[in-house]
Image (cartoon, rainbow, N blue to C red):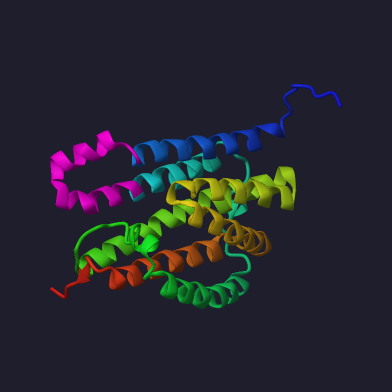
């Protein structure tokens, strides 16, 4: 079958969306993994403070590249409103049912997984030996902001544009493929785990028309894992003062 390189008006949105997602993730990844930048943090804040400041920086640039840049693209370039990309109040009751159904399962899974050596080698991401309430709250808030941006880009911006031009199942396939690939730096276990979760959250997002289930479930997953891991980690402890 012969293919032409003729550009069609409908190609612009899907082409730009995939380009923005790819460029945003690459920019985030290379900044977050930059040893040169991290060394600069160590020089400025010292080794101990960098354990906190660097993770907060990673999450902050995640908000920028995963949330703000796609949001600006939607606002200034695309014709549809933000509600067409998952930031919507549709099916909130159905979304709540899904959240209440999935959250206990994920919390239970994290409870049993938190003591495993490979999990404790990575979590909590902030590698402070002593945590106080302020640090717990700061980490939770930064996690929540990061995950809202993350879910908007993957399950809002990318997924809803893909559904519009590719159809439901090709869009879900593309979404989970990219979602799994971005988990590869965290190891094979998280990359493989992203596949079934990506399918479930992709289907729910399309059925509800919003990203809220994916967002809240992801926050529950991240925070419960952080808190269980903090409690289980032999080199970390929570102090009350």
On the image, which quarter does residue 127 sit in?
A: bottom left
- Residue 35 shown in magenta: yes
Residue 82 seen in render = no
Prevailing secondary structure class for the magenta stretch in the rendered image: helix
Residue appearing at x 62%, y 52% in the figure: 84
Q: How many marks?
A: 0
**Residue 117 screen position, x and y as percent:** 36, 64
**Residue 34 screen position, x and y as percent:** 32, 36
Residue 31 seen in render = yes
Residue appearing at x 40%, y 44% in the figure: 64
**In this rendering, position of residue 175 left or right of residue 104:** right
Q: Nearer the viewer, residue 84 or 97?
A: 97
Q: Quadrant of the N terminus?
A: top right
Q: Nearer the viewer, residue 21 or 112?
A: 112
Is 149 drawn above or below residue 140 in the view shown? above
Q: Quadrant of the C terminus?
A: bottom left
Residue appearing at x 27%, y 67% in the figure: 136
Q: Residue most toward the right? A: 1
**In this rendering, position of residue 229 left or right of residue 198:** left
Magenta span covers which residues? 33-58
**Residue 54 screen position, x and y as percent:** 26, 48
**Residue 81 screen position, x and y as percent:** 59, 48
**In this rendering, position of residue 179 left or right of residue 235:** right
Is 193 drawn above or below residue 182 in the view shown? below
Residue appearing at x 21%, y 70% in the figure: 237
């Amino acid at each position: 079958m012969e293919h032409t390189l003729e550009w069609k008006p409908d190609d612009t949105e899907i082409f730009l969306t995939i380009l923005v997602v790819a460029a945003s993730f690459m920019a985030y990844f290379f900044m977050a993994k930059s040893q040169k930048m991290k060394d600069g943090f160590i020089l400025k804040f010292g080794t101990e403070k960098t354990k906190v400041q660097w993770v907060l920086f990673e999450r902050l640039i995640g908000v920028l590249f995963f949330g703000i840049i796609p949001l600006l693209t939607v606002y200034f370039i695309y014709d549809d409103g933000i509600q067409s990309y998952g930031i919507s109040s549709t099916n909130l009751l159905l979304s709540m049912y899904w959240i209440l159904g999935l959250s206990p399962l994920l919390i239970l899974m994290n409870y049993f997984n938190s003591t495993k050596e490979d999990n404790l080698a990575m979590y909590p991401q902030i590698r402070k030996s002593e945590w106080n309430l302020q640090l717990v709250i700061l980490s939770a808030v930064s996690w929540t902001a990061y995950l809202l941006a993350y879910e908007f880009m993957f399950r809002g911006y990318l997924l809803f544009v893909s559904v519009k031009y590719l159809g439901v199942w090709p869009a879900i396939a593309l979404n989970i493929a990219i979602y799994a690939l971005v988990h590869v730096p965290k190891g094979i276990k998280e990359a493989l785990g992203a596949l079934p979760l990506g399918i479930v959250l992709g289907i729910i997002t399309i059925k509800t028309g919003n990203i809220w289930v994916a967002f809240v479930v992801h926050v529950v997953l991240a925070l419960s894992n952080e808190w269980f891991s903090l409690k289980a980690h032999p080199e970390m402890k929570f102090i009350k003062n």
